[in-house]
Image (spheres, rainbow, N blue to C red):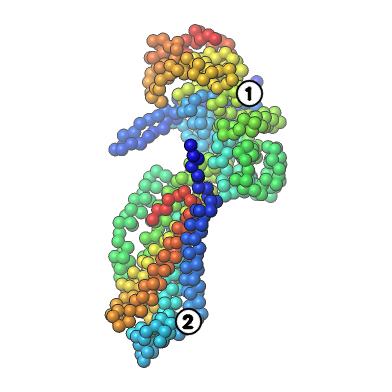
């Protein structure tokens, strides 16, 4: 009879696979953040500088990534686009994530009817198509950064509410929560002091994954003209604008497309890596 | 004689399992339990899994609400108190849980865990001395004061149970309800915890309710014992007497089925004859009727009440006169 080898958390085989994901995620996300931050103080050329004489120049002939139909430097636009999409995504996840977390903690603490109501409300939001709703919101609020942020945040609330409620419900029956009740603590204090710290890893993982999704949604919205208005460059609008010149100047589509794909990939890797490192057992709810 | 510290009267707790389409099934976890616990005593509760021991424990410290009946603690009916008053009252009764790995918050340091009830209960002026009191309490339960700066996972099971004990005792409660506090521990560590309980009773006058499925543990530390079966108390009396000379057939069976060097596994005729009956089914007769070796027709229709048997014990059995050694 042979003894089956068990894989322990510290085991080399798993930790290498895990840490490679984590490292890839950290590197890609780190580079993305660095580029976004650098764009605030320096870009090769001002991203809005129009040089008609150099329009549609191929990469390396004029600037690292070429120029667009108005002769603007694509690299500079991609860099500023990184800041625009990252800041929108972070703001949306911060708003939606915190509201959703509060709702989820409340639902798990209250149980019964309030929980059922909160979860059905989540179902209703899930049933709405996000892009259409964003268009409606845009019709009311006018297009702009805040429209995009609010439209994305609204759809983050139920995601976080569900994840947090599910995780918190697993914490509530634990004996240390009972002990806290025995120590005279009310449900709010217990939620903040005991439940939240013990589900923080799940929340961190969810924040990372949702950041990736928020970047994707922001790109879709600005592709449709519902994001930040011109002249501030966004990846989504760069993609939209590039369609007309796809045959002449494919680099116009490749640069923002790759940027979006890499950003989402990096954040997903980071989320997966964090999940594996922080809590290896909990399956992720997407 | 001082009045009892805890008086439990006709305590009943039903659990409802919701099914589809609003059909629900009721399980009676605790059935009409009446009990008194004397000040400064150690009261043991034994019974098999699912007999309602933990439900009774949770009700005694108001972590759950009963379907009917009341718990009078130190002259006050705790379930009729307003929420704020009950919260304040909680300092007088604390609980120690079975699993020393689940009862301590893994994200908090030991000092914070033990001091937690003080932060809630103590007045502003007294809070400054929390760390001193935590250190003193750690020494009380046999841990170094430096333990306060460590996390629970840095301790062994026995040490963690000591930490849980320290948390329960820091508010200087009158009653500590310990639900299977030694079941998850090694034998040698069990003995240490039992000695700690005896010590704390003798030095600080704490009243303990000690729940266990292990008769030897109860026999070792309890003054009085209550035997539970199917949510009811079937026998109450001084621990040694109850285990030496059981008066209820179920106590008899419990004792006979306890593992020891003298008892051979499988040698117990009662256990061998045993069949499973639906748990908590609300029937008219004695819950032990189906397994009872001395049952008569009356047992299937009339539920026996807990009555004094004339030797200073309470027994719930119609056939109490025919139980012999």
Horizontal arrangement in the rendering, residue A187 relative to residue B197 (left or right): left
Q: Which residue is mark 2?
A: A43
Residue A89 or residue A245, whichever sits in front? A245
Q: Residue at x 30, y 56 (%)?
A: A127
x then y, percent, for residue B23: 31, 34
Viewport quadrant of the N terminus of chain B: top right
x then y, percent, for residue A53: 36, 92
Count residues near mark 2 (Cα–Cα under 10 Å), then give few for <14, some for 14-19, many for 20+: some
Compared with A143, B204 (above or below) is above
Q: Quick check: can you spot residue A92?
A: no
Give the letter of the chain under mark 2. A
Q: Quick check: can you spot residue B156?
A: yes
Contact? badges 2 and 1 (CB < 8 Å): no
Q: Which residue is mark 1?
A: B220
Q: Residue at x 62, y 26 (%)?
A: B42
Residue A241 or residue B311, whichever sits in front? A241
Viewport quadrant of the C terminus of chain B: top right
Q: Can you tell which mark lies on residue B260?
A: none
x then y, percent, for residue B159: 64, 39
**What separation in Å lies between label 2 and label 1 (alpha carbons)?**
80 Å
SS for dot 1:
helix
Q: Residue at x 55, y 14 (%)?
A: B246
């Amino acid at each position: 009879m042979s003894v089956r080898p068990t894989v322990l958390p510290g085991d080399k085989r798993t930790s290498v696979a895990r840490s490679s994901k984590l490292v890839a995620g950290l590197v890609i996300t780190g580079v993305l953040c660095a580029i976004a931050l650098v764009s605030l103080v320096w870009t090769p050329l001002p991203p809005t500088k129009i040089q008609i004489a150099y329009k549609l120049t191929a990469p390396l002939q004029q600037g690292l990534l070429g120029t667009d139909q108005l002769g603007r430097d694509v690299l500079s636009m991609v860099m500023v686009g990184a800041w625009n999409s990252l800041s929108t995504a972070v703001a949306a996840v911060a708003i939606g994530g915190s509201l959703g977390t509060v709702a989820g903690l409340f639902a798990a603490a209250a149980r019964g009817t309030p929980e059922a109501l909160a979860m059905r409300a989540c179902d209703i939001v899930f049933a709405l198509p996000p892009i259409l709703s964003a268009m409606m919101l845009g019709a009311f609020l006018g297009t702009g950064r805040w429209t995009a942020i609010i439209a994305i945040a609204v759809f983050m609330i139920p995601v976080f509410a569900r994840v947090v409620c599910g995780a918190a419900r697993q914490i509530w029956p634990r004996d240390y929560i009972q002990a806290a009740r025995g120590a005279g603590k009310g449900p709010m204090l217990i939620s903040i002091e005991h439940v939240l710290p013990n589900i923080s890893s799940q929340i961190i993982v969810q924040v990372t994954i949702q950041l990736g999704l928020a970047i994707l949604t922001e790109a879709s919205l600005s592709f449709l003209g519902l994001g930040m208005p011109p002249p501030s460059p966004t990846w989504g609008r760069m993609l939209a604008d590039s369609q007309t010149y796809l045959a002449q100047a494919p680099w116009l589509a490749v640069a923002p497309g790759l940027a979006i794909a890499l950003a989402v990939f990096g954040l997903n890797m980071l989320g997966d890596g964090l999940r594996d490192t922080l809590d290896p057992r909990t399956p992720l709810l997407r | 004689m001082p009045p009892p510290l805890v008086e439990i009267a006709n305590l009943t707790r039903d659990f409802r399992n919701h099914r589809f389409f609003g059909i629900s099934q009721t399980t009676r976890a605790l059935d009409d339990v009446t009990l008194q616990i004397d000040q400064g005593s150690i009261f043991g509760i034994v019974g098999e899994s699912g007999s309602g021991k933990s439900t009774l424990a949770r009700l005694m410290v108001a972590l759950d609400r009963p379907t009917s009946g009341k718990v009078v603690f130190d002259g006050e009916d705790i379930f009729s108190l307003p929420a704020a008053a009950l919260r304040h009252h909680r300092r007088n009764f604390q609980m120690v849980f079975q699993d020393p790995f689940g009862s301590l918050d893994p994200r908090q340091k030991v000092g914070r865990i033990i001091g937690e009830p003080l932060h809630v209960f103590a007045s502003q002026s007294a809070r400054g001395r929390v760390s001193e009191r935590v250190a003193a309490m750690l020494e009380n339960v046999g841990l170094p004061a430096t333990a306060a700066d460590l996390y629970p996972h840095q301790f062994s099971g026995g040490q963690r149970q000591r930490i849980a004990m320290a948390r329960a005792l820091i508010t200087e409660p009158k009653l500590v309800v310990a639900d299977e506090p030694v079941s998850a521990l090694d034998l040698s560590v069990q003995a240490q915890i039992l000695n700690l309980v005896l010590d704390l009773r003798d030095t600080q006058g704490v009243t303990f309710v000690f729940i266990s499925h292990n008769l030897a543990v109860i026999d070792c530390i309890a003054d009085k014992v209550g035997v539970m079966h199917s949510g009811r108390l079937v026998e109450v009396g001084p621990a040694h007497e109850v285990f030496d000379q059981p008066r209820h057939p179920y106590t008899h069976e419990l004792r006979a089925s306890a593992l020891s060097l003298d008892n051979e596994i499988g040698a117990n005729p009662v256990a061998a004859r045993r069949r499973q009956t639906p748990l908590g089914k609300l029937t008219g007769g004695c819950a032990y009727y189906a397994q009872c070796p001395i049952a008569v027709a009356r047992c299937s229709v009339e539920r026996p009440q807990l009555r004094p048997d004339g030797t200073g014990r309470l027994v719930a059995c119609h056939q109490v006169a025919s139980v012999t050694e």
